[in-house]
């Protein structure tokens, strides 16, 4: 009978594309993974890996064996879930993938609470764009993904994947303080026609949403600056070179020299937790989803809808507290950074 641990190593190489990446995912050394593959080759009397350029590739036989191993990993996951439920407490390793502003604005408190309350649970976090994290869940690379979609671009149904809603996040437009729209109570898409935009690079969910929204105003948007970090976007806005759209989640104090404007209709992105069906009843998944929802309600006490509270935030009411970030009424520091009275949001974090 084929050794399960060696099949797991082969499956990891298939999923991650290299021995080194597979080793990182499994928590082994690259040499240990290579040894497992070599033993599996001897066990099956089949060449499984071959050199291709500077890397390696799976042979046709290995691809077939890896597909079978993936089915086996699903069976083992269901078995482990059943055992964990019998123990009645979260345990084992839980790999989470989250987009950057969720990793910054939501997950620190979640991870700290899980570590404090469930010492048998080993949680690992990777920062991943939602476009990629969904695939990583389905392939078994991560156990739980924090993703988002937008009100004009909903997340499609996914076979073999279950999800739970966490909350709704709103966004607002950031413009230079001397901008022609800076004193407006709110703006609409048509007011922003002809602006030079600062946005995330192509391929990100936020980039795709922004392009669709702006094209709805009848003109091709001018995406002048494509940068992945929100604080870089805001720095460019403060320099007067363009405008940007920033989310409420994960925000902290804006620099002096920018204004925050509500956009109508309000851009809303919905946050979800995703996991494989085979792990649906796993206590670690259930507890993590519960803590995520509780944390959201703590950060956004105005409700999980993000609508009424989001409108207040974009109109100048301070956003939710972000652990480790200055308060919304902070005074300027030596670098001259502070919230703008009546307009402050927060230290802006990475894209998505």
Image (spheres, grey):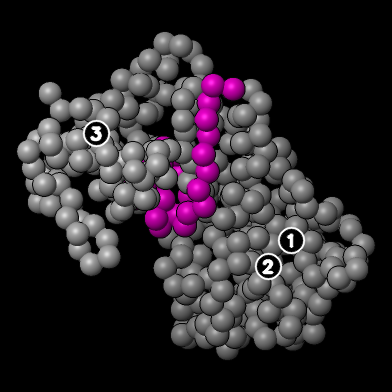
Badge 2 or badge 3: first in the primary sequence: 3
The C terminus is located in which quarter? bottom right
Q: Is residue 311 left or right of residue 150?
A: right
> Which residue shows up at 89% across the image and 57% down it?
329
Q: Which residue is the site of mark 3?
A: 6
Q: Residues within 10 Å of mark 3 (few under 14, many from 20)?
A: many
Q: Between marks 2 and 3, how big is the CA–CA gap?
A: 44 Å
Q: Between marks 1 and 2, how big is the CA–CA gap?
A: 7 Å
As drawn, the label of residue 36 is none
Between 22 and 336, the residue placed more toward the observer is 22
Is 121 within the magenta?
yes
Badge 1 or badge 2: first in the primary sequence: 2
Residue 29 position within the rendered picture, expressed as x and y whole percent measured from the top left: 40, 42
Between 142 and 267, the residue placed more toward the observer is 142
Q: Mark 2: which secondary structure? A: helix
Q: For residue 44, which quarter of the picture?
A: top left
Q: Which residue is the site of mark 1?
A: 347
Q: Between marks 3 and 1, how big is the CA–CA gap?
A: 46 Å
Badge 3 or badge 1: first in the primary sequence: 3
> Which residue shows up at 12% across the image and 23% down it?
1
């Amino acid at each position: 009978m084929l050794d399960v641990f060696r099949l797991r190593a082969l499956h990891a190489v298939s999923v991650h594309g290299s021995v080194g990446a597979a080793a990182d995912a499994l928590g082994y050394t690259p040499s240990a993974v290579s040894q497992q593959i070599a033993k599996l080759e001897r066990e099956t009397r089949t060449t499984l890996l071959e050199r291709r350029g500077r890397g390696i590739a799976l042979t046709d036989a290995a691809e077939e064996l890896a597909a079978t191993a993936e089915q086996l990993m699903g069976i083992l996951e269901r078995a482990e879930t059943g055992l964990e439920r019998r123990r009645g407490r979260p345990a084992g390793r839980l790999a989470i993938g989250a987009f950057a502003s969720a990793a910054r604005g939501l997950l620190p408190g979640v991870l700290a609470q899980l570590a404090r309350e469930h010492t048998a649970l080993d949680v690992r976090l990777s920062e991943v764009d939602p476009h990629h994290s969904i695939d990583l869940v389905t392939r078994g690379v991560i156990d739980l993904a924090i993703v988002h979609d937008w009100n004009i671009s909903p997340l499609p149904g996914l076979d073999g994947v279950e999800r739970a809603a966490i909350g709704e996040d709103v966004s607002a437009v950031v413009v230079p303080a001397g901008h022609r729209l800076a004193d407006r109570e709110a703006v609409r898409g048509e007011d922003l026609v002809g602006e030079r935009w600062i946005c995330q690079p192509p391929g990100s969910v936020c980039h795709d949403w922004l392009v669709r929204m702006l094209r709805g105003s009848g003109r091709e948007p001018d995406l002048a600056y494509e940068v992945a970090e929100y604080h870089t976007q805001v720095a460019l806005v403060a320099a007067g070179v363009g405008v940007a759209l920033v989310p409420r989640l994960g925000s902290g104090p804006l620099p002096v020299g920018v204004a925050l404007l509500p956009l109508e209709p309000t851009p809303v992105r919905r946050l979800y937790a995703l996991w494989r069906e085979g792990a649906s009843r796993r206590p670690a998944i259930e507890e993590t989803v519960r803590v995520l929802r509780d944390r959201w309600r703590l950060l956004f006490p105005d409700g999980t809808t993000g609508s009424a509270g989001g409108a207040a935030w974009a109109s100048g009411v301070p956003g939710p507290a972000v652990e480790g970030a200055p308060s919304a009424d902070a005074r300027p520091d030596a670098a001259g950074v502070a919230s703008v009275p009546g307009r402050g949001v927060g230290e802006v974090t990475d894209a998505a």
